[in-house]
Amino acid sequence: MLEVDNLVVFYGDAQALWGIDIMVNEGEICALVGSNGGGKTTFLKAVCGLLPIRQGSIRLAGKELTHAGAEERISLGLSMVPEGRKIFYNMTVEENLLTGAFVKRSWHRKQELMDRYFRLFPQLEKTRKQMGGTLSGGEQQMLAIARALMSQPKVLLLDEPSLGLAPKMVDLVMEMVTSIKQAGVTVLLVEQNLSKALQVANRGYVIESGRIVLHDSAAHLLENPKIKEAYFGL
Amino acid sequence: MDYFPILMEQVINGLVLGSMYALVASGLTLIWGTMKMLNFAHGELYMLGGFGLYFGLVQFHLPIWLVVPVVLFLIFVLAFFIEKGLLSPLVGKPGWEVNAVVITLGLGIFAQNLAFILWGGDFLNVPYVAEGAIHFSVIHLAWHRVYILALAVVVLIIFWQIMKRTRFGLAMRATAFDHETATLMGIPHRRVYSVTFGLSASLAALAGMALAPIFSVNPWMGMGPLVKGFIVVILGGLGSFLGAILGGFIVGISESLSVLFFPSGWKDLASFILLIIILVVKPSGLLGRKEW
């Protein structure tokens, strides 16, 4: 569904990504895990078009995205939940969802979509008239995910959805990710919380210092001795 | 001597003046909110509105209902392409805060001098839209002023509704809050900048047209309103649309009333003193967000 080949990204003169190959299959949850500073967010920003790429190619459902502008990529079917949720604090929950429906295919059925996500995430419905900035961290994460889904994406990119949330909320967010997959949306889940991510994912990639160092099925990665040693301290 | 009629007349004049300040300032605040720049050429867009009305009504003898929309449209298009050609290549790049000031200041000076070369420095008169006045017992009000107050209120309400209820308005508010996240919603933020700049220019031109019959048209007519516009947006809170409207009326009314107590040359001082007092009490302006 999403194919990234040999992606190279620079920040000024500093090379951040050294030829990343990632393939996300239709209908799966694919995890991209690794510690802080490994290049996870850089990778997502480059895929979305927020950062220029030096080399490599990006294809979505067979369509070349490499030279498309960021907003064009969204209208072609990518959607991203940014790190830190990035809720529009100056808008109500409803208005936040409506911004997610900005793309043409969603705008004419925005009400229907909004009702769908309020049904799917009933906790959000109670807050629909509140300003975005007054929500708790977990509610904001839910809103950010629902907002990203409003554009009816083919692939949803999630950047660190568990960051800064209480353990109970982390489990809830991971349940949400599973239900998104069951609703037919392909997910690329970027996480520092390796065990949580690999528990819900089908396959996983491990990134370190801008390079993919491992990729395998999620179950195998969880059993991999190198991972156990490096990330779980076993 | 009975002060009541004079007091009432000055309050109403203040409302009229305030509505024009609100038009000018709301344009400035829209630009600040979305593009994070101060537009020093805003007064010249106001000036072009005045000249547009003069040429339409006095030179070409066209009806007012035709002149106003045509001028608004032309200024919108002009500003749209100024943004695309001159500002867009630099917006958001390092040094933008300074570059924006240099570019718009230069544009303003260029426009003033171009107008001077093309149309001369005479003070041109434009006829009132409506002659006569309303009389409520002892209070007299020119119809022209009533019309421009009504026009400003209607236009500001329409703008407020655009921002609240339309797809473009949503895109504009999202871009103003965080343009990168807006992009992730599929919002073309550069297009939003161009359209917002065009709309802001149209608001300035509308104020220029409304006040042209009262203050006459000349290449420098925009300088006063620009300074007042800045006072109003800072007083109301930079980036706040409601703040610009509220600030506009406050400055308009206080200037009008100050004439009753001080020599009229002190009128401008009144708005500056008011600004300083409000900034001491609330540094972010009346409805401004704290940004520091």
Image: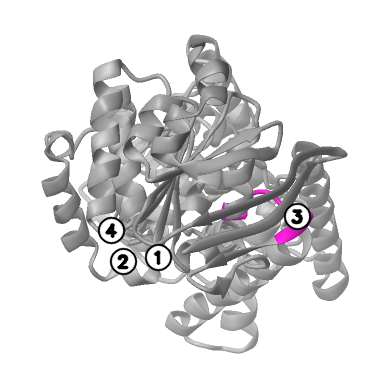
The image position of residue B275, as x and y in percent, is 55, 22
Displayed quadrant of residue A174: top left
Residue in the image at 49% along x and 49% along y: B182
Q: What label sits on residue B220 in the rendered view?
A: 3
Q: Are marks 2 and 4 on the same chain?
A: no
Q: Residue type at mark 4? A: Ile
- Is residue B36 visible in the rendered structure shown here? yes
Q: What label sits on residue A24 in the rendered view?
A: none
Residue in the image at 31% along x and 66% along y: A106
**Cα distance between the residues tagged 2 and 4:** 52 Å
**Cα distance between the residues tagged 3 and 2:** 48 Å
Report the magenta stretch's main SS: loop
Location of mark 1 (residue) = A103
- Classify mark 2: residues with Cα within 10 Å, few (<14), some (14-19) or many (20+): many
**Between B152 and A26, the one nearer to me in the picture:** A26
- Residues shaded magenta: A48-56
**Cα distance between the residues tagged 1 and 4:** 51 Å
- Helix, strand or loop at disc 4? strand
Q: Residue type at mark 3? A: Trp
- Give yes or no for contact between labels 4 and 3 (Cβ–Cβ under 8 Å): no
**Cα distance between the residues tagged 1 and 3:** 44 Å
Q: What label sits on residue A106 in the rendered view?
A: 2
- Give yes or no for contact between labels 2 and 1 (Cβ–Cβ under 8 Å): yes
Q: How many marks?
A: 4
Q: Are marks 1 and 3 on the same chain?
A: no
**Cα distance between the residues tagged 4 and 3:** 32 Å
Q: What label sits on residue B134 in the rendered view?
A: 4
Q: Nearer the viewer, mark 1 or mark 4?
A: 1
